[in-house]
Amino acid sequence: MEERRSYSRVPSRLMIFLTPVQTGRVFRVLTHDISGAGIRCTSDESLQPGTSLHVEVQLPDGGVPIKLTAQVVWSRTREESRSRWGVQYEVGIGFVEIAPKDRAIILHYARLATPEP
């Protein structure tokens, strides 16, 4: 299968805040990876594809949090989580609206976080 990504994913463990637009309820999730176009994360909350989100990302540099809007692209149950912590979900989130300067900050972070070969 041909890779269609415009931006490479970089493994990254960041705590981010998601707020579904429909409910306004804020919750924290842990990322698995990040790119200039989206995030893959683990959530205790079930998020359906198509759900619109407000996202706040705090990068490790301690700078101002990046705020953007996004949409759930896919969501699946993490099978290995069922017995240990209750049900958790792995979620793919695509950025919908992000300021060019904020995307540049994420891309810079991704370059710094990329492991050396």
Image (spheres, rainbow, N blue to C red):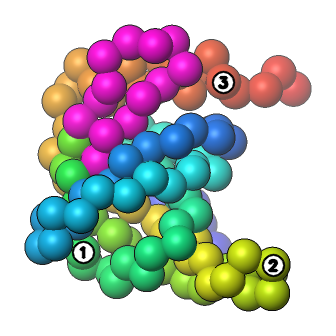
Coordinates of residue 22 in the picture (x, y in percent):
12, 73
Bounds of the magenta segment: 55-67
Q: Earlier in the sequence, mark 3 or mark 1?
A: 1
Pointers 3 and 2 in contact (C-beta within 8 Å) = no
From the viewer's perspective, tell me whether residue 44 is left or right of residue 23: right
Q: Which residue is disc 3 drawn over?
A: 113
Q: From this view, report whether residue 40 is shown above or below residue 77.
A: above
Instruction: Identify the element where label 3 is drawn.
Output: helix
- Report the disc number at residue 51: 1
Q: Nearer the viewer, mark 2 or mark 1?
A: 2
Q: Quadrant of the C terminus?
A: top right
Mark 2 to mark 1: distance in Å?
A: 27 Å
Q: Which kind of residue does numbered mark 3 sit on?
A: Ala
Query: Is residue 46 among the parts visible in the rendering?
Result: yes
SS at mark 2? Answer: loop
In front of the other: label 3 or label 2? Answer: 2
- Label 3 – label 2 distance at C-alpha: 30 Å
Tell me whether the residue at label 3 lies in contact with that at label 1, contact meaning CB atoms closer than 8 angstroms.
no
Please tell me the numbered disc located at residue 84: 2
Q: Residue furthest right?
A: 117
- Residues under numbered marks 2 and 1 in contact, where contact means CB atoms less than 8 Å apart: no
